[in-house]
Image (cartoon, grey):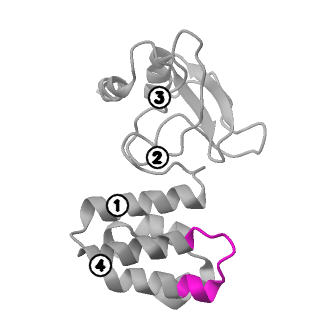
């Protein structure tokens, strides 16, 4: 049964496409795993054809999206060139996605889920653009998050996980009371 589920996940790959093994920091460990081998190794508790930890940084190695379980698409014929992508086909940011890429995901979530007025949508997008600045002081970050929360109060419910990965501890404590 588990093997059938895993084989179903392969349907998202293009013909001849391999599966990639990438660490949580985005280091490519193996760009061209065989899909059949991936299914067999995922269904069993057998050893893998790649290290469980990255040899560059020691992080855990992934072969599937942590949000939806789809295998990470690897190289494709004829050259099997591979580039690490910041997003899965399901739309979720990968663990190695940058702050700016996670902010893109947040914008996508808001676009897909919220029926905001045009004025609120503009305000939210302006605040997200401000948050993309790496040198934005925490007090200004807090004000930007407050403005977003006022314009889109439901955001913390359906976009909460990505929002929390973007906030500093200080902002999180001020805004949502989490330490």
Which of the labelled discs sits on residue 109, or is there none? 1
Dot 4: element = helix
Q: Residue at x 32, y 72 (%)?
A: 121
- Residue at which label 2 appears: 66
The vertical placement of 79 against 102, above or below, is: above
Left or right, 11 with respect to 126, comes to left
Q: In the rendered image, which quarter is residue 159 located in?
A: bottom left
Which of the labelled discs sits on residue 141, or is there none? none
**Of pointers 3 and 4, the one earlier in the residue sequence:** 3
- Mark in front: 2 vs 1: 1
Q: Nearer the viewer, residue 129 or 162?
A: 129
**Of pointers 2 and 1, the one earlier in the residue sequence:** 2
- Residue at which label 4 appears: 119
**Of pointers 2 and 4, the one earlier in the residue sequence:** 2
**Of pointers 3 and 1, the one earlier in the residue sequence:** 3
Which of the labelled discs sits on residue 42, or is there none? 3
Q: Residue 95 placed where, x, y %?
A: 56, 51
Q: Residue 155 placed where, x, y %?
A: 34, 73
**Of pointers 4 and 1, the one earlier in the residue sequence:** 1
Magenta stretch in the rendered image: 131-142
Q: Contact, CB < 8 Å: mark 3 with mark 1?
A: no
Q: Residue at x 42, y 85 (%)?
A: 147
- Mark in front: 3 vs 4: 4
Dot 2: element = loop
Left or right, 124 with respect to 20, comes to left
Dot 1: element = helix
- How far separated are the C-alphas under marks 4 and 1? 17 Å
- How far separated are the C-alphas under marks 2 and 1? 17 Å
The vertical placement of 136 against 9, above or below, is: below
Q: In the rendered image, which quarter is residue 85 located in?
A: top right
- Mark in front: 4 vs 1: 4
């Amino acid at each position: 049964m588990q093997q059938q589920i895993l084989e179903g996940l392969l349907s998202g790959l293009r013909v001849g496409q391999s599966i990639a093994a990438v660490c949580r920091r985005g280091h490519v460990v193996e760009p061209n795993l065989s899909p059949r081998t991936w299914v067999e190794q995922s269904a069993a508790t057998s050893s893998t054809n790649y290290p469980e930890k990255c040899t560059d940084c020691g992080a855990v190695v992934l072969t599937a999206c942590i949000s939806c379980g789809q295998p990470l698409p690897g190289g494709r014929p004829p050259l099997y060139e591979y580039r690490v992508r910041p997003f899965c086909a399901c739309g979720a940011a990968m663990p190695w996605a940058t702050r700016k890429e996670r902010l893109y995901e947040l914008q996508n979530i808001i676009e897909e889920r919220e029926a905001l007025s045009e004025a609120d949508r503009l305000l939210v997008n302006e605040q997200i653009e401000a948050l993309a600045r790496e040198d934005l002081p925490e007090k200004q970050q807090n004000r930007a998050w407050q403005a977003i929360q006022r314009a889109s109060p439901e955001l913390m419910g359906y976009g909460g996980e990505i929002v929390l990965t973007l906030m500093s501890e200080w902002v999180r404590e001020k805004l949502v009371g989490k330490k």
